[in-house]
Amino acid sequence: TQLLEQSPQFLSIQEGENLTVYCNSSSVFSSLQWYRQEPGEGPVLLVTVVTGGEVKKLKRLTFQFGDARKDSSLHITAAQPGDTGLYLCAGLPTDSWGKLQFGAGTQVVVTP
Amino acid sequence: NAGVMQNPRHLVRRRGQEARLRCSPMKGHSHVYWYRQLPEEGLKFMVYLQKENIIDESGMPKERFSAEFPKEGPSILRIQQVVRGDSAAYFCASSTQAQGQGAMQPQHFGDGTRLSIL
């Protein structure tokens, strides 16, 4: 079983600060997706990264896929209260056809 | 949420009853995935289906659980003789094609069905 470990589990910061969420595994993934989930709703896709070393930016969010495709990070610059939510990483193992493996999530709280 | 429709949103059953959860994928999507989310835990894969075929059911409990995706109509996750431990949020996702080597179509999720067992 390939496990995806997210850290930290919980992050509380003030508006305007920066934050980074990590997603690590000992196994290689063919792709990795980041989702954000609000209470009572399903995960909403933020980004998919596929190539080792790939960096994608989505406004104030920067996503990076590790060179070996085993880990990823999400960095938020100048966080806003609207960034509050549960951030989930999900990896697609190299031998899988659709069986996403999710991390346990990082709960981010941004206070005004 | 992203066009995947799940119903009901909330379902209450007594122990021993049957629960049927429905999922209509996004338009144009023929691949459906079911996941279960327990409190304080991440989403766990249950089953992957294409129209009329089960592709991967390695995450499904061996007993009481079944899934189908008929040629016409929504995908159905069926839980027979429910027990308290079945209480969870069940999410469905869909994609346009199989994910895997060289295929990058992401999975889009519905808002889930929250199942409560009395």
Image (cartoon, coloured by chain):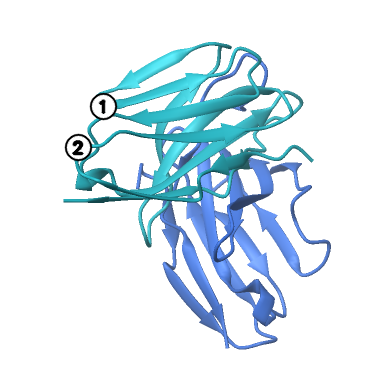
Chain colours: A cyan, B blue
Rendered image quadrant of residue B63: bottom right
Instruction: Give the vertical position of A50 relative to B33 (above or below).
Output: above
- Judged by depth in the image, the label closer to the viewer, 2 or 1, is 2
Residue named by callout 1:
A60
Residue behind mark 2? A16
Question: Which residue corresponds to the image point at 62% horizontal and 60% vertical from the top-left?
Answer: B77
Q: How crowded is mark 2: few (under 14 residues within 10 Å), some or many (20 or more)?
A: some
| Quadrant including the C terminus of chain B | bottom right
**In the image, residue B85 lies at what x, y percent?**
68, 75
For the residues beneath circles 2 and 1, the answer to whether they share a chain is yes
Residue drawn at (64%, 30%), measured in percent from left and top? A92
In this orientation, which residue lies closer to the viewer: A61 or B44? A61
Q: Which residue lies furthest to the right in this view?
A: B62
Q: Residue A99's spot in the image, x, y percent?
A: 67, 38
- Residue A49 at x, y percent in the picture: 50, 20
Would residue A83 appear left or right of B8 to someone viewing this image?
left
